[in-house]
Amino acid sequence: MGDFTKLQVWILAKELAVNIYSLTASEKFSKDYDMRNQLRRAAVSVPSNIAEGEESGYNPQSIRFFNIAKGSLAELRTQCIIAFEIGYLNSDDYTCIHDKTLKISSMLHKLI
């Protein structure tokens, strides 16, 4: 396996995590500690598991980590749907996150 920081899927997942951190720093999330932290944990889990899978050097183990990343991505998407529906995310932010999660999920599927 190579350098995980050069994987396009890792780059996009890391950018999404940074984006989630920025969005959850808004006042709407400030009083909902649980939602904010759950979104952040799920977002960070995606690039972290991609990195771990890429560096494991063992194909079945890599696939396991990539599948965990897909699961965290689904968790993040679910939480963003809820955040949007309760008014924490605006339509543009939600659409951007939704589109990125679908793209990353597709890339992970191909990687697996």
Image (spheres, rainbow, N blue to C red):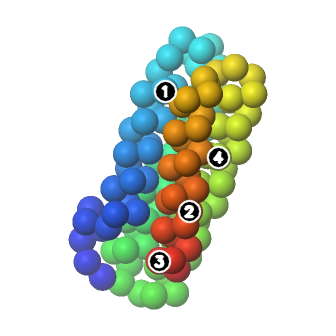
Which residue is identified by label 2?
105
Mark 1 sits on what residue? Answer: 23
How far, Cα to Cα, is label 4 from label 2? Answer: 11 Å
User: Is 84 located above or below residue 66 in the figure?
Assistant: above
Q: Residues within 10 Å of mark 4 (few under 14, many from 20)?
A: many
- SS label for mark 2: helix
Q: CA distance from mark 2 to mark 3?
A: 10 Å
The residue pinned by badge 4 equals 77
Q: Residue 16 versus residue 29: which sits nearer the camera? A: 16
On-image quarter of the N terminus? bottom left
- Dot placed on the residue nearer the N-terminal end, 3 or 1: 1
Residue depicted at x 24% and y 71%: 3
Is tag 1's residue or tag 4's residue first in the polypeptide sequence? 1
In the rendering, at what x and y percent does residue 24 appear? Answer: 51, 26
State whether residue 78 is above or below residue 27.
Answer: below
Amino acid type indicated by mark 1: Leu
Residue 111 has which mark?
A: 3
Q: Secondary structure at mark 3?
A: helix
From mark 3 to mark 1, how far is it between C-alphas? 28 Å
Q: Quadrant of residue 97?
A: top right
Residue 64 coordinates in the image, percent (x, y): 56, 76
x and y percentages locating residue 48 in the rendered image = 42, 57
* Circle 4: element type: helix
* Mark 2 / mark 3, whichever is N-terminal: 2
- Left or right for 45, reference 79: left
* Circle nearer the N terminus (1, 2): 1
**Local crowd size for mark 2, using a 10 Å CA cut-off: few (<14), some (14–19), many (≥20):** many
Report the residue at 26% width, 77% height from top: 2
Q: Nearer the viewer, residue 64 or 27?
A: 27
Q: Amino acid at mark 4?
A: Arg
